[in-house]
Amino acid sequence: MSTHTTADDLALAHMALVGYNVTEMLHRVPPSVSRDELASAGYLALVQAARAYDPSTNVPFARYASLRIKGALLDELRSMDWASRGTRRRGRELDQAAERLHATLGRTPTRDELAAALGTDVSTVDATRAAAERRVLSLDLPDSGVAETVRDDQQTPEESLIASERVHWLRTAVDVLPERLRVVVAGLYLEDRTVADVAAELGVTQSRISQLRTEALTLLRDGLNTAFDPDLVPAPERPDGVAERRRQGYFAAIAARAALAPAAPEGTVPTQRPAPAAAPVVRGVA
């Protein structure tokens, strides 16, 4: 049997992964996003993943393919939006600066005032405005000025997905924290408890709670950056040390549970206790 035949069989056996990932994404993006376009990108990514898969890595194909599919879907969402993320960010910064100056001055700010507030020059302000106007004109109907009065404050499909995905991973990262760290984070940030109250529950001093909080926040930050911004994760001082192995175990536990559990509905916050049937909690870091 040829390699391509084997890969195609592997892709056919896992076609449900595409439908699952597309459905999950559609719950978190505007309704204007086309399911068919996302599905096409997902199936192509599945086939490419099957042909590139190396069983000797001991990584389950479903997990490997899901990562490839999610990446392809995100690329497809990005391609649906003409404006780059930088263009949209600069447009939002200009709008926010204009609102602040209007509130302070009691009038519409001038181009020079906007440029000074943003720490840039007038030509950059003009270019940012021109980019925003091109977006409005692309939405406009022939001989109609309706779109010029409409302001788009909604997130782009890409921004909406990333925000929802970060909340999902944050919830997972809190759930798989070692027990003492999870109690500290949940108590201080989710349950509005005092440091003294949490210290009394754990039987430690308040200064120890501060240390545990710092340790927990560092783990959470690095755990999320491992998934979203790997370049921001600091290199370990002792890559083969026990502490680093525990950290890597924690990162792996986040990835495992985040991949298995569905994303939380928008607006939900992390819970203190994980579900009993989920991936095992990493212990021993604290």
Image (spheres, rainbow, N blue to C red):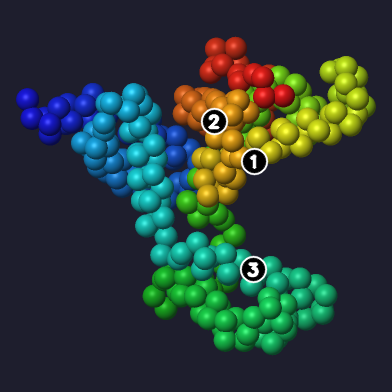
Label 2 secondary element:
loop
Q: Which mark is residue 221?
A: 1
Kindly report which numbered mark, 2 or 3, lies closer to the viewer in this rendering: 2
Q: Is residue 83 above or below residue 57?
A: below
Answer few, some or many: residues within 10 Å of disc 3's Cα (few below 14, many 20 plus, some between 14 and 19): few
Distance CA(mark 2)–CA(mark 3): 44 Å
Q: Is residue 110 above or below residue 55?
A: below
- Left or right of 217? Residue 125 is left
Answer few, some or many: residues within 10 Å of disc 2's Cα (few below 14, many 20 plus, some between 14 and 19): few
From this viewpoint, is residue 119 visible? yes
In the foreground, 1 or 31:
1
Q: Is residue 32 above or below residue 188?
A: below
Q: Which mark is residue 93?
A: 3
Label 3 secondary element:
helix
The three-letter amino acid code for the residue at tag 1 is Arg
- Identity of the residue drawn at 64% across and 72% down: 94
**Which of the image's four quarters has the N terminus?**
top left
Q: Which mark is residue 98?
A: none
Q: Quadrant of residue 52?
A: top left
| Residue 255 position in % (x across, y down) | 50, 30
- Identity of the residue drawn at 71% across and 32% down: 216
- Left or right of 279? Residue 176 is right
- Residue to which mark 2 is pinned: 240
Answer few, some or many: residues within 10 Å of disc 1's Cα (few below 14, many 20 plus, some between 14 and 19): some
Distance CA(mark 1)–CA(mark 2): 21 Å
